[in-house]
Amino acid sequence: MSHLQKLSPMLLDERLLDLEEPGWIYEVKYDGWRLMAEFGDGKCQLRTRRGADATGWFPEITSALAGMKGGPYLTDGEGCVLDDLGRSDFDRFQARAQRKGWYEGGDPVVYCVFDLLVDKGVDITRLPLVERKKRLAELFAVPPPSVLLVHYFDNAEHDIHRVFHEEVVPFELEGLVAKRLDSVYTPGTRTTDWVKVTRKNAIAAQRVRHAPKSKDISIGP
């Protein structure tokens, strides 16, 4: 059995979080479909969060990852369509994804990769996030076309409140994802080690469009 068949995505928690609490990193949250990718030495397979084989749906991603030397590797990330400002556009992504393949005039899909779970055939899910991030950055030191390495902010070096109000609010992004630096990867589990930090009144693109807007501020005290 391949690693792709054994590992399911780790899921986010939603709760209030003190952004000044030490030991966390923060990533911009992209809106698309969760994609697990297993690749290396001329091969690549993609799988959605619910286990569907998406290998043939996004050939621009599979061809880029198949060209990576070495392996096998397994990564976790988000398939997205990005606008001219680099923001994810879920409606455009969904229109492309529903066709389950490339078509003339379709929006290109980018793989926004944020975690490395298998490194050269070795399962590293029990290593702390900071080590997995280090290896991921080394793997994608020069990302191929259609692959975006998701960068993060360390709250030991950044004012996350400022980041939130300068990077998230003006561009009307959904929010950030907070992750404990020392967290291990627990497949298929909704864990408190990963927390969605949502912009006020933001509604995830996947939710019902006519749902009432939330009045909660989810960026903590």
Image (cartoon, rainbow, N blue to C red):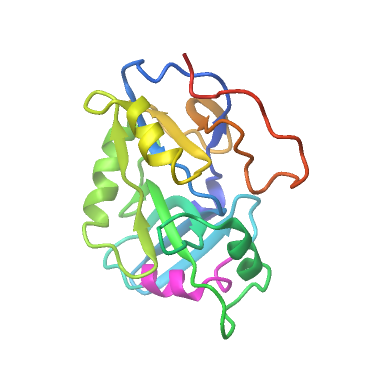
Residue 53 visible from this viewpoint: no
Q: Is residue 42 above or below residue 20?
A: below
Horizontal arrangement in the rendering, residue 6 relative to residue 156 (left or right): right
* Residue positioned most to the bottom: 104
Q: Is residue 17 left or right of residue 90?
A: left
- Find the magenta span and give its range: 53-66
**Farthest right residue in view:** 210
Q: Nearer the viewer, residue 30 or 125?
A: 30
**Image-quadrant location for residue 8:** top right
Relative vertical location of residue 88 with respect to residue 16 in this rendering, above or below: below
Looking at the image, residue 16 lies above or below residue 211: above
* Residue 216 picture location, percent across and down: 62, 23
Residue depicted at x 40% and y 33%: 165
Q: Position of residue 148 (x, y in %)?
A: 36, 58
Question: In this orientation, does residue 83 appear?
Answer: yes
Location of residue 114 with respect to 177 vertically, above or below: below
Using the image as rendered, state which of residue 116 and residue 78 is in the foreground: 78
49 sits to left or right of 63: right
How many numbered marks, from 0 up? 0
> Is residue 125 highlighted in magenta?
no
Q: Is residue 56 magenta?
A: yes
Q: Residue 23: percent from the left, percent from the top? A: 32, 21
Q: Residue at x 45, y 70 (%)?
A: 62
Tell me the quarter of the picture where residue 72 sits.
bottom left
Residue drawn at (37%, 63%) of the image: 147
